[in-house]
Amino acid sequence: MYSHLKQFTFLDLKLATRDFRPESLLEEGGFGCLFKGWVKENETAPVKPGTGLTVAVKTLNLDGFQCHKELLV
């Protein structure tokens, strides 16, 4: 049913966002931060910023008060 979904490792996401650098930060909210990253088209491998497919990576703030359902949205 969801065969088109890709599974990323934490290392993939860390590299794609350049180690969650402040310049990759798009937004900070109640559930955590939203970062911009780049991955190779049709893969999960990180690529040089500005190339490949742009992705948004959400991090969860375990001390936040937003519900888990909102994070999934």
Image (tube, rainbow, N blue to C red):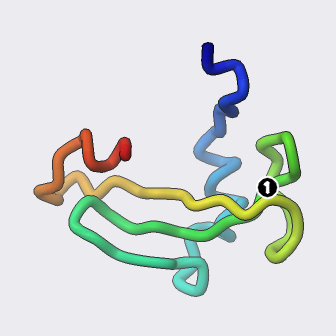
Residue most toward the front? Answer: 1
Residue 30 in the image: above or below residue 70: below
Q: Residue 32, located in which quarter of the rendered image?
A: bottom left
Q: Is residue 52 left or right of residue 4?
A: right
Q: Residue 51, located in which quarter of the rendered image?
A: bottom right
Q: Amino acid at mark 1?
A: Val
Residue most toward the bottom? Answer: 23
Q: Residues within 10 Å of mark 1 (few under 14, many from 20)?
A: many
Residue at the spot 59% in from the left edge and 45% down from the top edge: 10
Residue 69: x and y in percent read 25, 40
Q: Quadrant of the N terminus?
A: top right
Residue at the spot 39% in from the left edge and 68% down from the top edge: 33
Residue 45 in the image: above or below residue 61: above
Q: Is residue 11 left or right of residue 50?
A: left
Residue 33 in the image: above or below residue 27: above
Q: Which residue is mark 1?
A: 39
